[in-house]
């Protein structure tokens, strides 16, 4: 039996993905829009979903729209802007109760789909412009959202690492854009961009729940139709000659944040992608990994230390919080763990243990509707058709030799340290 | 084994109290891959003054010791338990709150083995001076991590403003100074006092066969000797009704200010149905007042006083309780003033209509359905409810029964000028 069964249908201008499952008490609708990250559009694009979710023609104020959501048994509407490799992805999600668990039999899925469509295609706008007041309010909130990165030092140090490491690459852009771009945005140019995005973006609609496929398809057909398009796609650019560098910033903080970026040069869908997953798991992905054991358990240097992959850009990031004066020691220990990986200094048991935990993690992700959408969307971003069964199977077959080969490809790019004002050097 | 059916939700749950006093709950979830289990003791950061078993005098233990104990239970003579869980394909974790310490795992295979590992590691402590010393460095880094987190400082600053004598105002992890005093003997003393099965609850949710799992748990427990255990005597000083401090401003390295308004709850000497009704009434009240569909939210957002970090919440346990409202803002003083005046109007009964109540009840019922999609939510919340003699699955019927009168009364009794307090985080250069 397949771990998940996804039906994909070609619709006008977008793809409809349906996952029929009885395990949830709600149905989930997710609309995704994707296009390459550019410095020209990044901030506009970060603003757009927030303007769209605040009102529509039929619900011309936030309180009217939100009251209607409350009426639909607290349907949960949220938007999100994220980076997948060098694409900027907008997501509009609506999770709505399945009426079979309510004493009130009013059918809710159709209403939920109608509301998502209303927000997407029927915004509060006239004469080719959004409502001015809404745009101004959301510009103010976007500014605070961008600033918030500086206030969370764990996020900030990761952001600084990416900025230094990927200088000159689109990936260095912050997903929420730049504060300096905000003043120039207005109800006209944002509306113009809205039309452009709906003409050019790659569009996908996901419906997860105890639904009838034909019914969902016919509702979607009635609500959402766009011009056909060939979405812009990026050629993967691989970094060849990586020159290692160290960057330090000083801030008034109590704990040093150490972030290290590596180039893996392996992308989702590549032959050795599965081996990369296992490699990351042995090296730093879990609480049985080398980083956790050596940096935390053996040397008591940190509370958190972990590595994670950026699967569509070919990066691996290590993050940890340490005392300022433990910088040299922590970096030395992390380097030693990487050397051990390259030298094949890990056992069959570590490999098996890691595979079991990765499989567990993947299956657990599929226990949430949101997790399912994220997993399935990897195929959209990478233009692949990897089924979850192939994924799990491919991962489980990885050999030690393949993991060592992957380890040899991994190159340290940038060591970033956010240190305190009083720290040495 | 007792079977409890929830018709509307189409769920069933199994329960048994074992001979040693352990409460065991099993909730089979069809279609899910993972099984999630929590093993929780009713022992948290506030339990710092108590009478150990077989002793005549009560002891006061260092701040942060419940959390320290949680860390140390993972270490055994032959290595750490994380390793064993991951060999069995599971991921394990734990957390300490004001009133609970929970150990948990989730896994999609080897469920029986993982369950045994969970029960055994919690029931077989192994503390040595050496491993205790080693942990001080790790927890020290956990504490400094939180020191740099403005939202955490704001949250705890607000609680410190409210409580003068009650230990809820002590940071759950303690301080680097306080944990330096912890010894292995103190850990054993806390363990002996609070980790008896009769003070604990085991919850398993996932695609499991209840009979088999219950048999396994019983067999495991029957192998272990537990003395009949006297009641736990916790000591708390009397707490004043008014807040300890009206305002606190923390200067931190941030770009955007933050402001939270808190209300210290008056009557928290509640449990069971009374507590559930009170808690839900206050939650519905806050939703009517500050939800995204409310007039207050529209006004505050329209004036640029709040952004999407704005939130509100009510927490209550035996002996303490508080509501908090706020978020990031460019005008922390104006926001505090506005929120207090909105709350005072609510105390006088303004803003509550039958229509807003019905809408909010629907919203709450829907969010409960969404929440029970999550095995984590079910296990953790069920345990919290049970420790307060409430039943998680009463939430929907009680919500449905709420009347406008419940809401206005809740506002009237919760909100009071002397129980308001404000905490702000302000950029250093301002």
Image: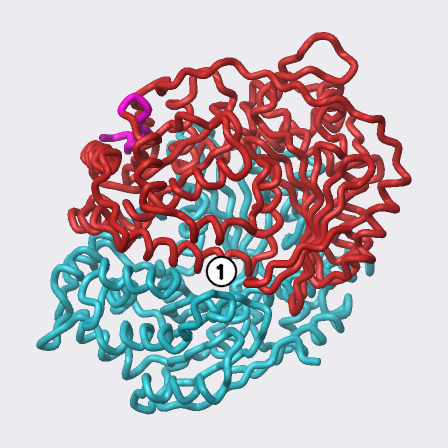
Residue B424: say if magenta.
Answer: yes
Which quadrant of the structure image shows residue A35?
Answer: bottom left
**The magenta stretch spans which residues?**
B417-430
Say few, some or many: other residues with alpha carbon within 10 Å of mark 1 (under 14 / 14 to 19 / 20 or more): many
User: Which percent across, then down, holds residue B231?
Assistant: 71, 22
Residue drawn at (58%, 77%), measured in percent from left and top? Answer: A269
B80 and A271: which one is in front? B80
Q: Is mark 1 on a helix, strand or loop?
A: helix
Question: What residue is pinned by disc 1?
Answer: B370
**In the rendered image, what is the letter of the chain coloured cyan?**
A
User: Which percent across, then down, holds residue B233?
Assistant: 66, 18
**In the rendered image, what is the letter of the chain coloured red?**
B
B171 and A83: which one is in front? B171
Residue drawn at (18%, 75%), measured in percent from left and top? Answer: A192
Q: In this view, does A191 lie to the left or right of A169?
A: left
Report whether residue A344 is seen. Answer: yes
> In which quadrant is the N terminus of chain A drawn?
bottom right
Residue A107: say if magenta.
Answer: no
* Image height of B65 relative to B394, above or below: above
Subunit under mark 1:
B
Q: In this view, does A267 lie to the left or right of A119?
A: right
A340 and B161: which one is in front? B161
Q: Residue furthest left?
A: A127
How many labels, in total? 1
User: Which percent across, then down, holds residue B287?
Assistant: 33, 48
User: Which percent across, then down, holds residue A94?
Assistant: 40, 67
């Amino acid at each position: 039996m397949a771990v998940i069964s996804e039906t994909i249908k070609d619709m006008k201008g977008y793809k409809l993905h349906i996952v029929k499952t009885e395990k949830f008490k709600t149905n989930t609708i997710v609309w995704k829009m994707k296009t390459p990250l550019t410095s020209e559009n990044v901030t506009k694009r970060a603003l757009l979903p927030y303007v769209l979710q605040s009102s529509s023609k039929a619900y011309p104020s936030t309180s009217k729209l939100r009251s209607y959501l409350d009426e639909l048994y607290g349907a949960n509407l949220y938007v999100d802007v994220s980076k997948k490799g060098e694409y900027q992805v907008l997501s509009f999600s609506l999770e709505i109760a399945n009426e079979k668990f309510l004493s009130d039999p009013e059918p809710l899925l159709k209403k939920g789909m109608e509301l998502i469509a209303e927000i997407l295609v029927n915004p509060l706008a006239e004469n080719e412009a959004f409502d001015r007041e809404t745009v101004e309010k959301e510009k103010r909130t976007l500014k605070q959202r961008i600033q918030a990165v500086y206030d969370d030092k764990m996020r900030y140090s990761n952001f600084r690492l990416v900025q230094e490491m990927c200088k000159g690459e689109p990936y260095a852009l912050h997903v929420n854009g730049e504060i300096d771009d905000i003043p120039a945005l207005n109800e006209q140019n944002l509306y113009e961009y809205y039309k452009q995005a709906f003409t050019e973006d790659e569009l996908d609609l996901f419906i997860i729940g105890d639904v009838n496929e034909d019914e969902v398809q016919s509702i979607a057909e009635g609500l959402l139709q766009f011009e056909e398009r060939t979405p812009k796609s990026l050629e993967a650019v691989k970094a060849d000659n990586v020159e290692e560098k160290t960057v330090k910033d000083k801030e008034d903080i109590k704990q040093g944040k150490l972030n290290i970026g590596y180039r893996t040069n392996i992308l989702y869908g590549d032959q050795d992608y599965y081996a990369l997953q296992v490699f990351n798991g042995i090296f730093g992905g879990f609480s049985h990994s080398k980083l956790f054991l050596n940096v935390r358990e053996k040397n008591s240097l940190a509370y958190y230390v972990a590595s994670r992959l950026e699967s569509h850009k070919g990066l691996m990031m290590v993050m940890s919080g340490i005392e300022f004066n433990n910088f040299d020691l922590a970096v030395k220990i992390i380097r030693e763990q990487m050397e051990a990986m390259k030298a094949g200094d890990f056992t069959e048991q570590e490999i098996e243990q890691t595979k079991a935990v990765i499989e567990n993690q993947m299956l657990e992700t599929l226990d949430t509707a949101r997790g399912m959408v994220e997993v399935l969307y990897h195929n959209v971003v990478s233009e692949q058709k990897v089924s979850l069964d192939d994924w799990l199977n491919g991962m489980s077959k990885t050999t030690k030799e393949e993991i060592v080969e992957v380890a040899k490809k991994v190159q340290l790019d940038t060591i970033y340290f956010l240190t305190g004002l009083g720290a040495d050097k | 084994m007792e079977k409890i059916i929830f018709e509307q939700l189409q769920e069933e749950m199994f329960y048994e109290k074992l001979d040693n006093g352990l409460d065991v709950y099993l909730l089979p979830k069809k279609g899910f891959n993972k099984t999630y289990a929590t093993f929780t003791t009713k022992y948290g950061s506030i339990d710092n003054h108590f009478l150990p078993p077989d002793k005549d005098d009560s002891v006061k233990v260092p701040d942060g010791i419940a959390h320290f104990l949680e860390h140390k239970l993972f270490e055994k003579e032959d290595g750490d338990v994380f390793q064993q869980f991951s060999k069995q394909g599971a991921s394990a974790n734990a957390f300490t709150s004001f009133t609970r310490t929970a150990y948990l795992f989730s896994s999609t295979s080897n469920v029986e083995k993982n369950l045994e590992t969970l029960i055994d590691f919690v029931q077989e402590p192994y503390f040595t001076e050496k491993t205790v010393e080693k942990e001080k460095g790790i927890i020290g880094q956990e504490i400094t991590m939180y020191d740099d987190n403005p939202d955490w400082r704001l949250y705890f600053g607000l609680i410190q403003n409210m409580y003068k004598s009650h230990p809820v105002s002590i940071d759950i992890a303690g301080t680097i100074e306080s944990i330096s005093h912890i010894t292995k003997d103190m850990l054993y003393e806390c363990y002996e006092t609070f980790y008896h099965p009769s003070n604990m609850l085991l919850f398993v949710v996932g695609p499991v066969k209840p009979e088999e799992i219950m048999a396994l748990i019983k067999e495991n427990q029957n192998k272990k000797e537990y003395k009949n255990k006297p009641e736990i005597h916790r000591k708390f000083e009397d707490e004043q009704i008014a807040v300890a401090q009206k305002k606190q401003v923390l200067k931190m390295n941030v770009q955007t200010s933050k402001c939270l308004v808190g209300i210290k709850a008056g009557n928290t000497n509640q449990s069971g149905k009374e507590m559930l009704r009170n808690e839900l009434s206050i939650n519905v009240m806050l939703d009517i007042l500050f939800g995204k569909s409310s007039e207050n939210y529209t006004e505050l957002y329209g004036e640029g006083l709040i952004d999407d970090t704005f939130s509100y919440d009510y927490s209550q346990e035996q002996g303490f309780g508080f509501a908090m409202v706020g978020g990031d803002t460019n005008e922390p003083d104006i926001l505090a003033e506005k929120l207090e005046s909105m709350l005072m109007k609510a105390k006088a009964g303004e803003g509550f209509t039958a229509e807003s109540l019905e809408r909010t009840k629907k919203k709450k019922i829907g969010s409960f359905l969404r929440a029970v999609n999550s095995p984590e939510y079910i296990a953790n919340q069920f345990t919290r409810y049970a420790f307060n003699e409430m039943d998680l699955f009463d939430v929907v019927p009680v919500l449905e029964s709420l009347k406008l009168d419940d809401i206005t009364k809740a506002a009237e009794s919760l909100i009071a000028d002397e129980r308001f307090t404000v905490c702000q985080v302000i950029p250093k250069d301002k």
